[in-house]
Structures are given as structure tokens and as C-alpha cells.
Amino acid sequence: MPVTAWLGVAWASVALAGGPAPGSSAELCLGCHADVSVAPDPKLKDLDASAHRRLDCLACHPQAGEQPHPKGLRAVDCARCHERPARELAASPHGQAVLARHRGELRRACGACHGRVHDIRAPADSRSKVAGPKMASTCGGCHGAVAAVFGASVHGKAASHGIRAAPTCSDCHGSHSIRPPREAGGPLSPGKRAGTCEDCHQSTRLATRFGLPKDRVQTFEESFHGLAGRGGDVKVADCASCHGWHDVLPSTDERSRIHPQNLASTCGQCHPDAGRRWTAGSVKVHQTLGRDGGGSPIARFVRLLYLIAIPLTALGMVLHNGLDLARKARAPRRWRHREGEVPLSPSERWQHAANAVAFVLLAYSGFALQLPDAWWAAPLRAIGGEEARRDAHRAAAALFLVTGAVHAAYLATRKGRARLRAMLPARRDLRDPLELAAYNAGLRDKPPALLQFSYIEKFEYWALVWGSFVMTATGGLLLFHNAALAWLPLWTVEVARTAHYLEAVLACLAILLWHGYWVALDPEVYPMDWAWLRGEARHPGTKEKP
């Protein structure tokens, strides 16, 4: 049989583990390329131990089937078998550089990382150039300075000690499809870096094995930084902004960016002068900036107060209004009448409208920060993500403040002073709710004669005044956080954040459960109290019913 035909048949054969199959082209080739003493190419002696030991020689050298061998016999590109990795590599900066330098021979880039063709080993093989412990030195062939910094980091030291779970270059940068760090969509691009770190740090198994804190990902995601990043802000701080990239070190190391003595400069990259009061070593940034304020006892106390007040207040409103609704549902319908009722003026109605618009937009854009992945937050994500949400929230806050200022000026007028006097707490505001509750429970024959501004309106009005004060004070502290972080302890910012969020929850519940009932669900005004449009409760054209 001609040699070329024999080799052609052998091309389809697959060698068994440990050596070439009998009768294969590899067996024939080894007749000349057996060892250093005989072989023209001594590199072939490593083929038996390589990842390619099961392949036929013709898989990489198809032109070797010709006898005698043609001049300049070379291996074909690795893409012949490794199509997808080769395609990804060709599109990467590494592949582009090699193709430009070596006239399109991509295999040179493969060999730079994986080694000689005949000695390529599987990544799981500890002798492989891309095995975890050797990855940094392999990449260091071109990136020496970076490899040295990485080798001194917690990740590099763990990898050098043979810990397979330790992240190496390819775990963060990728392997064949490496992209520049700033390129959009890459694993280390802004907005993606946190997710890359979370791949390992959210693993309970790894945290347990290496004694790592199990809540680091959760507390980061619940902080403003994490929430803003999930909302699409690519400028907000992420893991690498504080911990570094290749130079990640424990907080106990004086060289670490998160060592107490270095916090001022680390946080100062984004917040000038921030952290200069944090060098005592007692600040726990992750816990303090998390939603629970775990590192701030005062923030935890404020949160506890709200978590008690919110359900109790909501329960009280539901019981109060539920009794009222149950009594009115059993009685013939009548239209609401209040003693001494004076229709709302156009100025008062405009103030109400502006306040309502500001409130709704504030609530929507504020909760979109806390729940950036919610379906109802999709419009904000579509028009600009976190930046659009932030702009909308601040615009609504400005409208809210302007409305408050206009209302304060209105209270200085004669009519405004009269309205304010009517809104002041009075002794009957303690008696009326008890009498109304007794009537609704069937213990009283007649309901109390409520004024236009009874305890119902007063409760809501002064709750709005209190909530406006709390939201303005805490919102201002969060808006001017750089000044706050420079002059105030970190716990003040976390208290402001905790109170701002939970006060908003309480305010929205009050609008839904209290205001919503008395202006829409109350049978005496259903389906709407029209005073916000025309000054009086009843819509024009309605008739009094018995």
C-alpha cells in the first residue's frame, strides 16, 4: 500500500491513552521522531504526556502525508479543532497583536500561553502552563509587573500554594475572549466588575471552607453603591474601587487599601476628605453601609423604631377605616357633610396638585433605587438607568421643597392663618375618634359631628409636616454626602439613609391606607372626593340622598 494511502487511513484512527494506536500514523512517525538520539525533532518526545496524545500526527500536520515531506512543514492553526476558542482569541487584543505581527498565524498566540504544541497539557494538569499555580507566571511573561503585584495578593498567594479554588488571571479576565478592562460588556468593565467578584464571594461553600464572611455580597448589594450599580450606574464604586484589582490584601495588612489608616485616601478617591475620622479601626464599612446598618448601633436602633411604628400605624389605620367602611356599607348612602366647610381656594388646590405630583414621583424614583430590578422600574432603566432615576428624584425633591415654601408663605396670609388655626390640635380631637369608633362598633346611635378639618385631616396634615421635615433633613444629608462624610461620623449618613427609606415606606402606607380611604373609598365620597378639583367634596350634578 502506498505510504500516502496508509497515512490517509491512519488519519481517522484514535490513539489509546498512554500512546499511539498500533498501525496509526503516530506509530509510523515515531519511527523517525522517537527520541533525542534518533529524532530530527526532539520536541516530539513529550507528545505521549500531552493533552494531544490521543490525536494522530496528521490531525495537526495533514501535509506530512506527502513523501518526502514538503519544505517548511508546519502545524496548522489550532482553529482546525478548537474553532470557538480560536474565534474568541482572534477578536481579543492578544489575538489581534499576534495576527498583525506574524502574518495571520494565530497558533503562535496559543503557544504563548499553552506552551509547545507537543507538550500542551490540560488545565487541570498541575504541569500545565495555564494551571492555577502557574497562571500568574505564564501571564507574567508579558505582564511581569502586574504578575508580581498579583503574586503578593491574597489571591496570588493562595494560588501559589496550590489552592485550586483561588482565582487567577483567567477567572477575572477570561481566557480566550479577554477584553480591555474599560470595554463595555467585558467581565471587568464598569458595571460588571462587582458581578465578577461575586461569582466566588457569594459562594457559601467557599466562604465556609476559607473562613470568609458570608454576608459581604449581600451587604454590598444593599448599600447605595450596590443598588446604584444594579440600576446601571457605571461610575459608582464597586469591589475593585475599594479593595483594588491585582493588589487585593486583607484589611490587617498596612499596605491594604482598606486598612483603617488608608481608608481616608481610598474613600477620598470619590469623596474628598471622607474617612479622616475612620482610622480608629472600629468602622465596619460593609455592615454600616448595608440596608440593616449592621455596623451602626444608632442606625439599628432607628430601624427598630420604624419596624415597630410602621406595622402598628398601618394596623391602626386598617382597623379604624375598616370599622368605618363596615358601618357605612350597612347603612343607606349619604353624601359627606362637614360643619363649617369652606371650599378650597384655587391656590390651595394648586398646592395640593404640585405636592401630589412631587410625592408620587419621589416615591417612584426612590423605591426604584431600592428595587432596581423590579418590573415597574423598567421605564427608568429604559431612559437612562440610575442617572435618569437620580435626576428624576432630585427634580421631584426640588418641586416638593418649592411647594413647601409656597405653602409656608400662604400660611402667612389671612386665609392661610385661618386654615392653620383650624388645623391646630384641639381637645375634641381626642373625643371625636372615640365617639366615631363607638358609633361604628354599634355602641352609639349617632356619629360625632365632624368639622371640615377634623382629627382625620389633622392627623394627615401634621404627619405630612413631620415627614417633610424628616425627608428633607435626611435627603439633604444624603445629597451633600461628601460634606457629611468629611465632617460627621459615618453613622450619621447611615442613620439618614435608614430613616429616609423607612419614612418613605411609612408615608406611602399612610397615603394608601388613610388618605386613599377618605378621598376615594369612603362610601360618602366614592368614587372620588372632588374637592381637589373644584373645592367641594361632591361632584357637580350629584343629588343628596337620604
Image: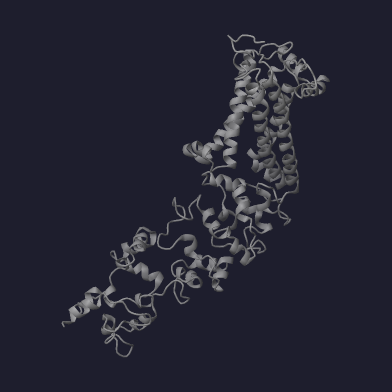
Q: Position of residue 57 (x, y in %)?
A: 28, 77
- Left-right relation of 468 to 445: left
Residue at x 40%, y 62% (from the top left corner): 176
Residue 71 visible in the shown view: no
| Quadrant into which the C terminus falls | top right
Task: Return the x and y of residue 544 as percentages of the image width and height.
Answer: 64, 9
Q: Quadrant of residue 165?
A: bottom right
Q: Nearer the viewer, residue 144 or 154?
A: 154
Residue 159 is drawn in which quadrant?
bottom right
Q: As rendered, which of 22 and 438 lies closer to the eye? A: 438
> x, y percentage for residue 46?
37, 82
State how the image is colored. one colour
Tell me if residue 278 comes above or below residue 421 in the rendering.
Answer: below
Q: Quadrant of the N terminus?
A: bottom left
Horizontal and vertical percent for residue 198?
55, 56
State the residue at coordinates (53%, 44%): 233
Front residue of 30/16: it is: 16
For the view shown, which residue lies furthest in the bottom direction?
A: 37
Residue that appears at 68% across and 58% down: 261
Residue at 66% of width from left, 33% of height from top? 509
